[in-house]
Image (cartoon, grey):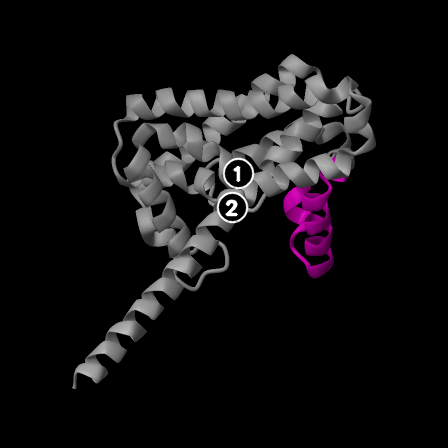
């Protein structure tokens, strides 16, 4: 169902609206809500499509699980399993095909996204499989980077399991625990906006950091050139 909606322009608009309003997405899935949620989590966890509403979707699913007819323990187990399997797929894709999926000018599978994940993996090793779960794009490509680096599979299994458990169960449980708080129900749009903002904050910080670094480099080069001209 999700794939069918995304094949045309109007479907893309609908998908974007779903990203902004995960409650509508969950309701639209109807009786397939559990399987649809699992599919989104699986894809976002390592199957090379990183622009899906992960955190906000899980938080909302936990918050509205009674209304959606979802058994909370079953939802948690199935989401954790989907997150685990998605990362496993990413690991094997990375080990077998590596960079073949990525191009510098691609709209989604950009080389720079993979390089960012590789740097993150080099800096944090297995811990990146846990920490990276909470960073958009990074969580999708970290398993791929681990596979490309031939990271020991047993260690990958351990950190992948831990990351899937903390990320998947964590957001669902937080949503469920806040389900009885009137303020959360009355301000769900605001709450989801904050979650989305926090999830993309590392990306924003990196972009701002790169911009400032570029400006500082340009200023240094200009100053050095001026000094050379003055010396002459």
| Horizontal and vertical percent position of residue 150 | 25, 35
Q: Is residue 169 visible?
A: yes
Q: Residues within 10 Å of mark 1 (few under 14, many from 20)?
A: many
Locate residue 195 relative to residue 110 in the image: left or right.
right
On screen, 232 above or below 206? Answer: below
Circle 1 SS class: helix
Residue 49 circle label:
2
In which quadrant of the rendered view does residue 25 lie?
top right
Q: Residue 9 bears which disc, if any? A: none
* Quadrant of the rendering where the N terminus is positioned: top right
Q: Which residues are magenta?
A: 1-25
Q: Please identify the dominant SS of the magenta region.
A: helix
Q: Secondary structure at mark 2?
A: loop
Q: Is residue 131 above or below residue 197?
A: above
Residue 98 image point, x, y percent: 32, 46
Residue 123 as seen in the image, left or right of residue 207: left
Circle nearer the N terminus (1, 2) = 1
Q: Position of residue 49 (x, y in %)?
A: 51, 46
Q: Which residue is mark 1?
A: 43
Residue 183 point in image, percent of width and height: 80, 27
């Amino acid at each position: 169902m999700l794939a069918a909606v995304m094949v045309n322009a109007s479907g893309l608009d609908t998908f974007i609206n779903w990203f902004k309003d995960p409650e509508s997405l969950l309701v639209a899935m109807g009786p397939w809500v559990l399987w649809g949620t699992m599919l989104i989590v699986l894809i976002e966890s390592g199957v090379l499509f990183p622009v899906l509403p992960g955190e906000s979707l899980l938080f909302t699913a936990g918050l509205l699980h009674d209304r959606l007819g979802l058994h909370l323990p079953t939802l948690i187990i199935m989401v954790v399993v989907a997150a685990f399997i998605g990362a496993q797929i990413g690991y094997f894709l990375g080990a077998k095909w590596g960079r073949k999926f990525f191009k510098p000018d691609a709209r989604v599978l950009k080389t720079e996204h993979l390089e960012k994940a590789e740097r993150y993996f080099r800096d944090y090793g297995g811990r990146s499989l846990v920490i990276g779960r909470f960073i958009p794009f990074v969580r999708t490509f970290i398993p791929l980077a681990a596979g490309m680096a031939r990271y020991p599979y047993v260690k990958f299994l351990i950190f992948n399991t831990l990351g899937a458990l903390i990320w998947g169960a964590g957001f669902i449980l937080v949503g469920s625990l806040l389900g009885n708080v009137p303020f959360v129900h009355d301000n769900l749009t605001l709450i989801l906006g904050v979650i989305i903002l926090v999830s993309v904050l590392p990306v924003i910080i990196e972009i701002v950091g790169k911009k400032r670094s570029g400006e500082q480099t340009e200023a240094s080069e200009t100053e050095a050139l001026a000094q050379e001209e003055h010396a002459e």
